[in-house]
Amino acid sequence: MNKDITHCLLCAQRIQAVISWRILLTKQFPPTICDRCMAQFEDSSCAFAIYKYNEAMKVYLHQYKFLQDIALAKVFRQQIHAHFRKERAIIIPIPMHPLKQIERTFSHVEELLKAACIPYIQLLEKTTTETQSTKNREQRIQVAPLFRLIAGRQVEYQDYLLFDDIKTTGTTLQHATTILLDAGAKNVRTFTLISG
Amino acid sequence: MNYRSWIVPPALRDFHEGRIWLKEHSPFAQQDIERALQHHYVQVLPGIQTIPSIKCNRCHNQNRHQFILFDCAKCQKTCVYCRHCIKMGRVSSCTQLMIWAGPRFIKQKKHTFHWTGQFTLLQRKAADEVLASVKQRRSHIITAVCGAGKTELLFPTVYYALCQGLRICIATPRTDVVLELFPRFQRTFPQTTIHALYGDAPKQEGYAQLIIATTHQLYRFKQAFDVMIVDEADAFPYVFDDTLQQAVQKAKTAIAPIIVVTATPSQKLLSQFPTVQRSFIPKRYHNHPLPVPQFSALWRYEKCFRAGKIPRKLKKWVEHQLAQQRPFLLFFPTIELMLVAEPLFQAMESTIVAVHAEDPERKEKVLQLRQREVKGLLTTTILERGITIANVQVAVIGAESAIFTASALIQIAGRVGRHVDFADGDILFFHHGITAEMDEARAEIIKYNKEGFSE
């Protein structure tokens, strides 16, 4: 169990290992999906995300989040690792509501960071079990605060980086940013895997 | 006052009988399920068993590489889940699978059999043999050439089993085949509740005594069927996937007979059946021999396509079909090469289109060919079986590719000449070197013709 991955996590084809100087000389995670599946994902045009939301990404998110296929957290570990490797700000993943987390059995945003070996801390907690994806734009903008600080945690005068899986209108990240800035953070930036 | 007795909601029983289902995914209210549990109408077992060895209790997958350990937020410990059947909703060691053990549906024994077709002598003989086997509860294999009318000869057996109050499943590896069989059986048995199950199938009400399903859907059944029919048993992925074959065994009761229907049985499969349990139809229903494939060398066709040219021989063949106004199918070994070739053919004739497995308009395109709206289709092996188009001409490009096994080539050749008015047609294997598989396919077809027309 949980051995080296020899078959693509998405299409179950055998992964053809291509040897290159880059793989020999740099430290990289072994690939978890085949080149054909990787080519389906489009790079994002914006600087605050890695990928664009497209059909392949929709299928990926469905299997990862709703079918709860945790193994898929590893698919983008190389890209996430490469992006955060030299990050000096403190990374905070967007939290899930504890009840939702029990229902899903894992926190999908934290698992992405864990798979990429990126250290993070958690200062926030979610106040509602409602999801953003069920609401329309107006409803999303006019809601009570989605997050609060975990009791007893201190926000220091430092740089923070909020990480989420997907950004559509940006409301979630906006709420979290406000909480951190109000609590005395020096600067808060945001980054997502996918831009909607 | 506390009522002790409880009347089972019929819908709950109808749905869950025979099914092995994730308890939390049941379409019914959890309190009803709990109620049924208290009355021991539902048996619960863990999703993954670890003793004696790890095994998914739904799909019976035992490949250790397909089990993933994870930190479960629900149990606060390390759990394990099965990736093999993940598309049907995750089964992990902390999920519960439920099986109905309560009162059973009282099956109807009155059914109407509405079919006006006629059997040929060979079909009649095979149909009688199958029926005799099922009456004695023994398994049977039907081998019949493509276009022999295999589906029809199941009708008497299905009718007999329905009238006996048995539950029947017709399983096939292909969704296309399910979609084709379902309306045919509905027409033949108009008073019987029939369900068609496949990925993304709509919800269907009631208890179905006859289920037409893809073999994947059988993961979701346990000891449910008294007669199991496996159609197109030689199709991908059934022959290569052991868990699918186990699923067929798991979904039927221990004594239920299996009827295997195939055009190209392997020796291994055939040897499992004694002679009395085999039926063979070497002739098509219209009593004409099968068209024999011809080989035609098309050296370095791949290079030619990539250079933006259609190989001369192939171009001539296509031009000939266009001039004769005959619909044609061109089989390609890979989607990629097909997409390279598509614009080249479209330059010749604008209505030629390509179709592949992930194509959302797949059904429409085949229909367009049937209605002569498009002149020809480029396709991969997905159209190798289950489609019937009158007067279709077929060419296989790159017949030497590994994907074209002997059984695939026999199936492809079987597309030609199915209609009684157009009993002959072209079947060409364009190749870059002849393989043993190609020879085998040709030899097999010649053998069938010999057997069918020896008297």
Image (cartoon, grey):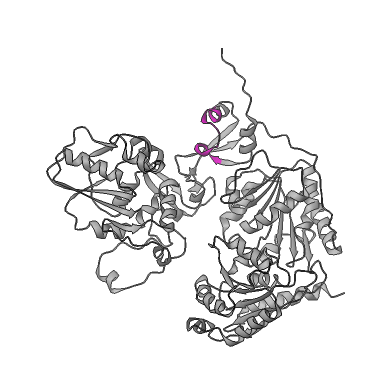
Q: Can residue B33 be found in the magenta stretch? A: yes
Q: Where is residue B195 in the image (x, y as percent from the top left)?
A: 66, 46
In front of the other: A54 or A111: A54
Residue depicted at 56% across the width and 15% down the height: B2
Q: Where is residue B27 in the image (x, y as percent from the top left)?
A: 55, 37
In front of the other: A39 or B153: A39
Does residue B301 lie above or below B88 as drawn? below
Does residue A30 lie above or below A129 as drawn? below
Residue depicted at 70% across the width and 60% down the height: B272
Q: Quadrant where the N terminus of chain B lies?
A: top right
Q: Is residue B246 left or right of residue A111?
A: right
Residue A80, picture quadrant: bottom left
In front of the other: A162 or B17: A162
Q: Can residue B156 be found in the magenta stretch? A: no
Q: In this view, does A25 lie to the left or right of A30?
A: left
Q: In this view, does A36 lie to the left or right of B300?
A: left
Residue A122, picture quadrant: top left
Looking at the rendering, the stretch of residues picked out in magenta corresponds to B21-34
- Single out the residue that lies furthest toward the front: A138
Q: Position of residue B278 (x, y in %)?
A: 77, 61
